Image (spheres, rainbow, N blue to C red):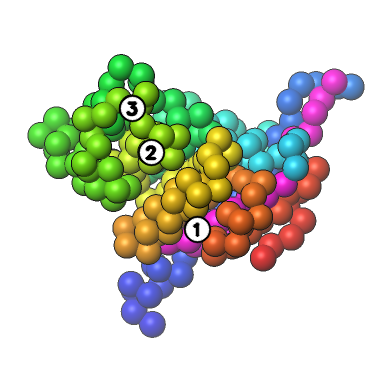
Amino acid sequence: MNNEQVISTAPLLTAERVTRVFGRGSAAVHALKGANLSIPPKRLVALKGRSGSGKTTLINILGALDRPTEGKVFFNETEISGLSEKARNEHRRVHMGLIFQSFALVPLMTAYENVEFGLRIAGIPASLHKAYTERALELVGLKTRMQHRPFEMSGGEQQRVAIARAIAHKPSLILADEPTAELDSKMGMQVMKVFRDLVQHEGMAIILTTHDPAIMSVVDQVYALEDGLIVEEA
């Protein structure tokens, strides 16, 4: 087996016995109770579970937005869960893209400006902004709408702008918390097609949380969470 094959089979992201406790004593809430998972590169993965099952807590820890109370998270076999806040911010800025249920676009900025703003935050050199922004909007099918503002777009288009902003700096991992929850089924599947294309053609891994059985039917792998534990894989 050559080196390229060895690298391709290593997990991109691994969580080992991840626990997260909020509060102390009798008021403590155990949001995660020793969750384990392993995500290969170039995979579209869903985390499913009822409200309160720990999905958002887990995705926040995987995305270096929060640290586990116990356990470890590894990215490309390097532990990121024990990093300082500054180091986690830098890791996230370079290697990850985040997408949320609310589109979180700047209302008075065009689609182009919203995506470019993300590149500025990511520290991408200004000389690359135009090419990166246009490429990201092209990947989500919005290159002809780049001068439109959010109020001139449908919900599905706004979410695709949010995806373009998350992928413009070319991360290897996208984390999306309920990215289709505010969309109707048709728009939700349009977003999932974008995700599938990003995995297949751009080599990204994507982890998303969802309640929607239709969304779960088009991903590569599903992890089910219940009471802070991963109870099944499909």
Lower sequence index among marks 1 and 3: 1
Q: Quadrant of residue 124?
A: top left
Which residue occupies 55% across, 42% down? 184
Residue carrying label 1: 44
* Amino acid type, residue under disc 2 in the picture: Glu
* Amino acid type, residue under disc 3 in the picture: Glu
Disc 2 to disc 1, C-alpha distance: 21 Å
Q: Which residue lies furthest to the left in this view?
A: 127
Lower sequence index among marks 3 and 2: 3
Check disc 1 and report its element: helix, strand or loop.
strand
Residue 4, above or below 37: below
Q: Can residue 116 be seen in this view?
A: no
Residue 220 covered by magenta stretch = no
Lower sequence index among marks 2 and 1: 1
Q: Quadrant of residue 19?
A: top right
Q: Give percent across and percent down for residue 173.
A: 42, 49
Residue carrying label 2: 157
Which residue occupies 30% across, 25% down? 149
Residue carrying label 3: 152
Q: Give percent across and percent down for residue 45.
A: 55, 56
Q: Residues in magenta?
A: 27-49
Q: Which residue lies furthest to the top in this view?
A: 108
Left or right position of 228 against 39: right
